[in-house]
Image (tube, rainbow, N blue to C red):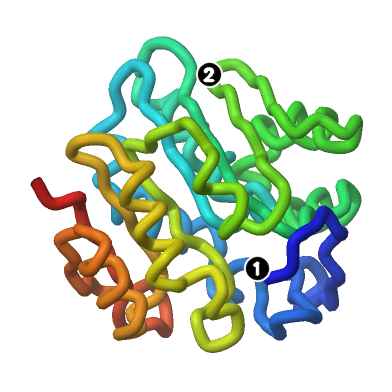
């Protein structure tokens, strides 16, 4: 994965599903991106049940921001106090118009998306909304994650597939994910690739394969071992 802050280059499927021309994959499931987010990343991390004041989600692969918005909706519905903390690493941020086009497929997030889109279009990479403080760190995660001082309670591992984007699933990067996970922290990802499961187990996570979303038979989730 190259370093830098280049804008994502896209094709479009079904009018509003962005497809990366670099990796040849859609940013979210053609069978329902919001449902996939809730099944894989929220439920996969035991959310919203684990929410508490100061809870911190970290993510590899910001994409359209859909995961962040779904998390914020769940946070607000949980009546947790204070803001949700959210940190995401993204090497190729999407242009504001492209994010707006992609999110138009999900009227359920329109209310929370409006403030995000306005800030993103203004060039903000720290997003502040009622109930949310989010930092989007642009650049190569392999370089940016190590110096990051934070520790997450839950990780969303949402890069493009290991076959197409292996740099985001290396043993070294999964070790950094573990090093930046708080006590009792968890991860979830849509992929069930054996190389990813092994890398996460080697990093210190207790790893399990779970039923996937839609046409994907399996996904992976787990927690940091004691």
Q: Residues within 10 Å of mark 2 (few under 14, many from 20)?
A: some
Identify the residue at horizontal 87%, vertical 52% (top origin).
95
**Residue 67 % position (x, y):** 54, 49
Label number found at residue 51: none
Q: Is residue 43 visible?
A: no
The spot of residue 182 in percent (x, y) is 28, 36
Seen at 60% across and 30% down, the residue is: 134
Alpha carbon of mark 2 to alpha carbon of mark 1: how far? 25 Å
- Image spot of residue 187 (x, y percent): 32, 54
Instruction: Work out whether 99 lies above or below 158.
Output: above
Q: Can you see residue 183?
A: yes
At a point 38% along the width and 11% down the height, the residue shown is 81
Among the two numbered marks 2 and 1 on one chain, the one whose residue lies closer to the N terminus: 1
* For residue 83, above or below residue 171: above
Quadrant of the image for the N terminus? bottom right
Element type at mark 2: loop
Determine the image quadrant of residue 204. bottom left
Name the residue carrying label 2. 131
Q: Nearer the viewer, residue 24 or 112?
A: 24
Query: Going by the image, does 157 lie left or right of 206?
Result: right
Which numbered circle lies on residue 27? 1
Q: Nearer the viewer, residue 215 or 128?
A: 128
Q: Residue furthest left?
A: 226
Q: Based on the displayed image, in which of its 4 quarters is residue 175 positioned? A: bottom left
Q: Crowding at label 1, few (<14), some or many (≥20) Cα neighbours within 10 Å? A: many
């Amino acid at each position: 994965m190259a370093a830098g802050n280049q804008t994502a280059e896209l094709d479009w499927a079904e009018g509003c599903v962005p497809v990366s021309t670099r990796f040849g994959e859609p940013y979210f499931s053609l069978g329902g991106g919001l449902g996939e987010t809730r099944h894989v990343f929220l439920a996969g991390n035991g959310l919203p049940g684990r929410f508490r004041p100061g809870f911190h989600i970290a993510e590899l692969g910001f994409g359209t921001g859909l995961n962040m918005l779904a998390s914020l909706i769940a946070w607000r519905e949980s009546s947790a106090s204070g803001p949700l903390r959210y940190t995401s690493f993204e090497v190729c941020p999407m242009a504001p118009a492209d994010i707006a086009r992609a999110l138009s497929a999900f009227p359920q997030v329109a209310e929370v998306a409006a403030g995000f889109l306005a800030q993103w279009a203004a060039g903000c990479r720290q997003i502040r909304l009622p109930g949310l403080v989010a930092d989007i760190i642009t650049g190569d995660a392999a370089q940016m994650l190590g110096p990051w001082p934070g520790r997450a309670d839950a990780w969303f591992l949402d890069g493009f597939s290991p076959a197409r984007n292996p740099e985001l699933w290396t043993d070294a990067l999964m070790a950094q994910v573990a090093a930046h996970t708080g006590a009792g922290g968890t991860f979830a990802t849509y992929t069930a690739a054996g190389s990813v499961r092994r890398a996460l187990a080697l990093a210190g996570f207790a790893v399990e394969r779970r039923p996937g979303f839609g046409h994907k038979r399996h996904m992976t989730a787990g927690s940091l071992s004691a």
